Amino acid sequence: MNKVDLNSDMGESFGRYKLGNDEEIMRHISSANIACGFHAGDPHILKYTIKLAKESGTAVGAHPGLPDLLGFGRRAMDTTPEELYDYFVYQIGAVQAFCTVMGVPMQHVKGHGIVEMMSTERPELAEAIASAVKDVNPDLLYMTIAGTTLYETCKKTGLRVAGEAYGDRAYNDDGTLVSRKLPGSVIADPEVVAARIIQLLDTGTVTTYKGGTIKIAAQSICMHGDTPGAANLIRIVREKLDERGISVVPVGTLV
Amino acid sequence: MNKVDLNSDMGESFGRYKLGNDEEIMRHISSANIACGFHAGDPHILKYTIKLAKESGTAVGAHPGLPDLLGFGRRAMDTTPEELYDYFVYQIGAVQAFCTVMGVPMQHVKGHGIVEMMSTERPELAEAIASAVKDVNPDLLYMTIAGTTLYETCKKTGLRVAGEAYGDRAYNDDGTLVSRKLPGSVIADPEVVAARIIQLLDTGTVTTYKGGTIKIAAQSICMHGDTPGAANLIRIVREKLDERGISVVPVGTLV
Amino acid sequence: MNKVDLNSDMGESFGRYKLGNDEEIMRHISSANIACGFHAGDPHILKYTIKLAKESGTAVGAHPGLPDLLGFGRRAMDTTPEELYDYFVYQIGAVQAFCTVMGVPMQHVKGHGIVEMMSTERPELAEAIASAVKDVNPDLLYMTIAGTTLYETCKKTGLRVAGEAYGDRAYNDDGTLVSRKLPGSVIADPEVVAARIIQLLDTGTVTTYKGGTIKIAAQSICMHGDTPGAANLIRIVREKLDERGISVVPVGTLV
Amino acid sequence: MNKVDLNSDMGESFGRYKLGNDEEIMRHISSANIACGFHAGDPHILKYTIKLAKESGTAVGAHPGLPDLLGFGRRAMDTTPEELYDYFVYQIGAVQAFCTVMGVPMQHVKGHGIVEMMSTERPELAEAIASAVKDVNPDLLYMTIAGTTLYETCKKTGLRVAGEAYGDRAYNDDGTLVSRKLPGSVIADPEVVAARIIQLLDTGTVTTYKGGTIKIAAQSICMHGDTPGAANLIRIVREKLDERGISVVPVGTLV
């Protein structure tokens, strides 16, 4: 495979609060997961971020989360499937309106981290997410980790689905991510991250934390945008991919 | 004129808080202005209210407001035109998504009271509102009091515009509403309200607080849904109109 | 025992949204658990409710909850102990300020339902709650169901603790409440509720759902204020207690 | 005068959003105006900021604002005096509770910028603020610009009041601040700012934008903490004051 998508969470600022370096990172990625105003983001940030994406030719996606700005949407909440369905519809609709206003299409939806984790434990939440996306717009692509409950549910629902992998996170032998509490779970060296992505593209595999080899089906690589040095890491990874002749393209062209 | 629209603010509940008798009122009106989650309403209420509207054949509109749930969006806020534009885009988008999900078209937009009043004092806010509506969907109709700055601005922007009048509020000779602080400013007697509406339809005039006669260009009558006895008043007005052979129809068919 | 406290959740309105009949219920209870602005209530409601309590001689308590107005604080959230500690300190402080302003003492704290349930599964949350209350004011009494983790933790921390029982809920043989999903789990007949309270006071026992008898150590009876007919039920219960010569007094005088 | 207070707005972060460099600035100032969770700040930030203040011996004050996190409390809102009173009581109470928990006294209250400006136009708002502070705790000192409506109102109410001046803002001849839109309205050079403060302390005067000289009665100098280079500017100013033998002390010791 000589094409890959790089995606990153964007638009996470709020009001006067600035988070991340979207201006820089947007230029190196091909798909932007844009916060929708529940766990992060607000109407102005939303519009501004879509404008940034448009200027750099980055594909736009909605990144819906839980209504918990105080916790940045990272705390599991005991929501019902209907609540989650409604939260997704609402947030996707808001992003869609700004896409319309800015004259860009919406490519994909990717749920915020904790929502996706909740959907692994409660399949009815995966159903709710998949239905919400399909009901609002069946042409939207859903992006999530390949092989998860949510991934399979979206496929069954009839949505196009893109699998994603993490370039800067170590994997366990069962394909899950190594806990952030362990040393070496997060990879900060751009050279190593680039090498891992290239291995993934060349061989479809990842070398695990314990030294094993596992298969990962991914068309998109998630790049964290909110860690120190994130912009620099993404820039270097992008350069390495360019050097190898690997095109970085929106995931919608790959699935 | 033997046709008129009755519009009412709907979907103003929030979470566990119930406001108004939407189930009853929805059956008697032809256009619903649905709160969008900023000054009132939430994603679930939004979906539920659109479902109610669909069941009764009532046309759906978005009713965007200020981000001030604590004040029910009734307190003037010193927002910039760009902020207001973004608030409208965001809220209209959210309502649109639920319309899509429920399989009903969105007919109109009507700004929450204080927003419309703010736009009278600051024409740049009227511009922001008109642009937001047009940019999201130029087929949307804007409903507001005929002759206001906002009304004229929407017209100039190229939007279809519907004028509305108040059946249960007394008018001053200059066409403004009599202050709620004065006795008799709010009319509670359904018979009187119905008579005023019928006069308006027959003659295009309203008898003012001081006994004068003024012309009002209105295709829609705003019925307050949140006062005690509102459901009863609306039901009786509807009956009186039916008796007179006046069809109550969505305003989109009248302009 | 010829004395008992009746407690009820009060001050759950928000902005323009009215919930419950505090004006009526406040007159029949002896301890008010007042929402603090996170899951319900707002600064104005808070002041108004303390004023109501003062007028009827009802003792005031803070009723802290999760920061989830949309879900009325009823959805379990994965908060850390430190977060919960801080939420309690913040909310108790806000209520204390209004008590000062109104010239009434604060008697107690009682956590909102889901918080107390969360503390049963995660003892570190019970520690956080107990510490927060003690650190803000060691003279505050904590009210909760006798025998729970939270009850015991508050006792160990050195707080005065009051046990409460439910007059209108059926009990299982192990002292837990019968699920609301089962018929007969909620008792609506005031006569029955009053009889159960009187049995509890006379014998320290409750007759369970299955007909057994269990001991309950309670100085306060929780009366739900948000169900239809709640005000009427509480009024009648109060009358029955009066008839039996049972004094209804603030729990602070009983422990 | 060889003593002066330096005050700065602190604790304006929210959830995952970091604003300002409180860790550094707190060491150079003598009074901290701490956001209370309405326009900025949250319970955790509040506790953390008071801890920082305690560690550096900085006096703690509450910095209440409007309930508008999205607008950082900077947008005028049409609140009633009663609403503002209640917002102040609520927020001061929350800060007081964390002061208690951390074992530090609360020295003062200073309203957020727009609230103070609103109170200039509407004296009834100044009355509301003064009453709220006095009713919660008459020993609290109120800090604001000398000579304003709010300043005089607090004095009349019987509160101790401290006057503040701006070291980094140019003044008009009438004592008001030069609009930020004009060049030179904000002074970024630490040497100049220090010189202006020293002039103020030595002579009680400020050289105005147009070159005149006006008297300013100030015991405290407000240092902006949220501009680029703010920490550096405050550090240098502090050094210059130290060099001149001017003690930087909490304003409570000066009035």
Image (cartoon, coloured by chain):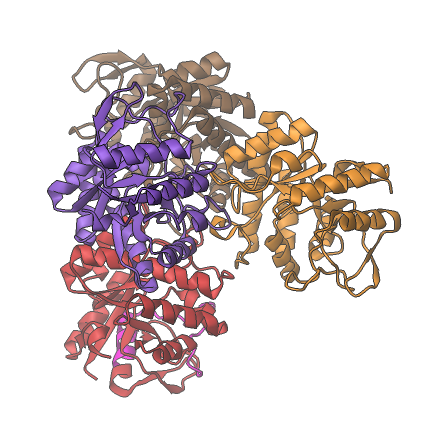
Chain colours: A purple, B red, C brown, D orange
Q: Is residue B41 above or below residue B193?
A: above
**Horizontal and vertical percent for residue C187?**
23, 29
Up-down: is D225 above or below C235? below
Q: Position of residue A170 (x, y in %)?
A: 33, 26
Identify the residue at horizontal 46%, vertical 46% (top origin): A21
B202 or A71: nearer the eye?
Answer: A71
Res. A172 in view: yes
| Quarter the N terminus of chain D occupies | top right
Query: In screen coordinates, is A95 left or right of D157?
Result: left
Residue extent of the magenta highlight: B173-198
> x and y percent of residue D20 in the render?
58, 42
Number of marks present in the image shown: 0
At which x and y percent is residue A192?
37, 31
Q: Is residue D169 above or below residue C184?
A: below
Q: Quadrant of residue B167?
A: bottom left
Looking at the image, residue C52 sits to the left or right of residue D177; the answer is left
Q: Name the residue nearer the viewer: D255 or C255.
A: D255
Residue B116 vertical placement versus A65 (above, below): below
Quarter of the image with the C terminus of chain D is top right
